[in-house]
Amino acid sequence: MNDIRLKLSLLLLRYGVALVFLMWTFDKLIRPDHAAGVFSHFYLIESIAPMIMKVIGGLELVLIGLFLLGWKKRFTYGSILILHAISTFSSYRQFFNPFTGTNLLFFASIPMLAAAVALFLLRESDQLLTIRSKGDI
């Protein structure tokens, strides 16, 4: 495969995954009560105060920014992968009833998880628009 095509593909995957994470993060910052409801329903974490949800959103925003920049890839790409894996697997009930309500939308998490895995495994090749430093990979 042409090296520039691989690098461009990885850049687009990184930006696509980051966009989804940004939307989820904005939900925590703009609608902390809604995000707390999501945490309660899917992660069984009850009663998260709006301020705590905003702190979580702020930390996620920093992580996403570093992920977008391709900084410390083992850490940032790995963190994104782990967070999304938790998110995907915590919604397992929706996969068993795909045609109930909006459950079909949860299937979009599977290709995004595959993209996060691909980015982590190919992080050394993801070099377009990244900040690189020694020992970064």
Image (cartoon, rainbow, N blue to C red):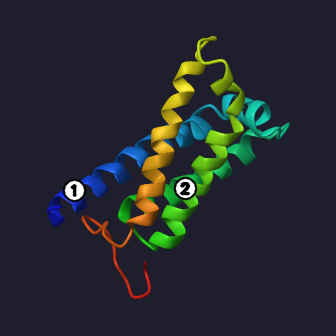
Q: How far is disc 2 from disc 1 in space, using C-alphas?
A: 20 Å
62 or 104, which lies in front?
Answer: 104
Q: Which residue is mark 1?
A: 8
Residue 22 appears in the picture as rendered: no
Rendered view: 131 above or below 129: below
Between residue 86 and residue 20, name the one nearer to us. 86
> Crowding near pointer 1: few (<14 within 10 Å), some, many (20+)?
some
Residue depicted at 52% across the width and 60% down the height:
63
**Front-lying residue, 130 or 104:** 104
The residue positioned farthest toward the bottom in the image shown: 134
Instruction: Indicate the amino acid at tag 1.
Output: Leu
Residue at screen point 17% across, 66% down = 3
Q: In the image as oriented, which residue stretches furthest toward the right?
A: 46
Viewed as shown, does residue 34 lie left or right of 40? left
Nearer the N terminus, badge 2 or badge 1? 1
Residue 67 coordinates in the image, percent (x, y): 44, 61
Return the x and y of residue 2 as percentages of the image width and height. 14, 62
Residue that badge 2 annotates: 81
Q: Residue 35 has which mark?
A: none
Judging from the image, what secondary structure is the residue with disc 2 in?
helix
- Left or right for 16, reference 23: left
The amino acid beneath tag 2 is Leu
The quadrant of the picture occupied by the N terminus is bottom left
Q: Quadrant of residue 30?
A: top right
- Mark 2 is surrounded, within 10 Å at the Cα level, by few (under 14), some (14 to 19) or many (20 or more) other residues, namely many
On screen, 34 above or below 3?
A: above
- Examine the image and state in which quarter residue 45 appears: top right
Question: In what quadrant of the picture does the C terminus appear?
Answer: bottom left
Q: Secondary structure at mark 1?
A: helix
The picture places residue 72, in percent across and down from the top left corner, at 46, 74
